[in-house]
Image (cartoon, rainbow, N blue to C red):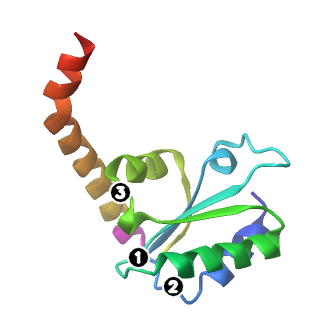
Amino acid sequence: MKDEIIQIILEKLKDIDKEIVYIFGSYAKKENTEDSDVDIAFYSKDEYDSFDIFLLAQEISSEIKKEVDLVQLKNSSTVFQKEVVENGIYIYEKSSTLREKFELLVYKKYFKLNEERKEIIDNYEV
């Protein structure tokens, strides 16, 4: 992803008290095409109104001339958080310690979820 696009994204997110910002999806996998949207996820201790997030995504979209999907990780499922952490690329971190702590917590919650649903999955496979 071009540095100028990253700078636009971070500039547009300046009013959000963000801890971490990730790019995920086709851009993170380097499988993007001309028609690909830009998938952005951010983690903040604060919770933001979904309509405000939608409007912010539209602002970013109009600047970079690409469709944008902007997601709050705080409100996302454990499985989605794990996918972003595992396959995404962070483009901003308030501190590396905070990012590493968040990522470890996501993996911990994911492994706990797998333990909790192991019996269900095992029974389904039979």
Of labels 1 and 3, earlier in sequence is: 1
Q: CA distance from mark 2 to mark 1?
A: 8 Å
Q: CA distance from mark 3 to mark 2?
A: 20 Å
For the stretch drawn in magenta, what is the main secondary structure? helix
* Residue contact between numbered discs 2 and 1, judged by CB atoms under 8 Å: yes
Residue in front for this viewpoint, 69 or 15: 69
Mark 3 Cα shell of 10 Å, populated few (<14), some (14-19), many (≥20): some
The residue wearing badge 2 is 16
* 102 relative to 19 in the view: left or right: left
| Relative to 123, residue 74 above or below | below
Q: Which residues are magenta?
A: 94-99
Mark 1 Cα shell of 10 Å, populated few (<14), some (14-19), many (≥20): some
| Relative to 76, residue 29 above or below | above
* 45 relative to 6 in the view: left or right: left
* Residue contact between numbered discs 3 and 2, judged by CB atoms under 8 Å: no
The residue wearing badge 1 is 44
Question: Which residue occupies the extreme top position in the image?
Answer: 126
The residue wearing badge 3 is 103
Residue in the picture at 56% in, 90% down = 15
Q: Is residue 97 magenta?
A: yes
Q: Is residue 112 visible?
A: yes
Amino acid found under the numbered disc labelled 2: Ile
Residue in front for this viewpoint, 2 or 25: 25
In the rendering, at what x and y percent does residue 44 appear?
41, 76
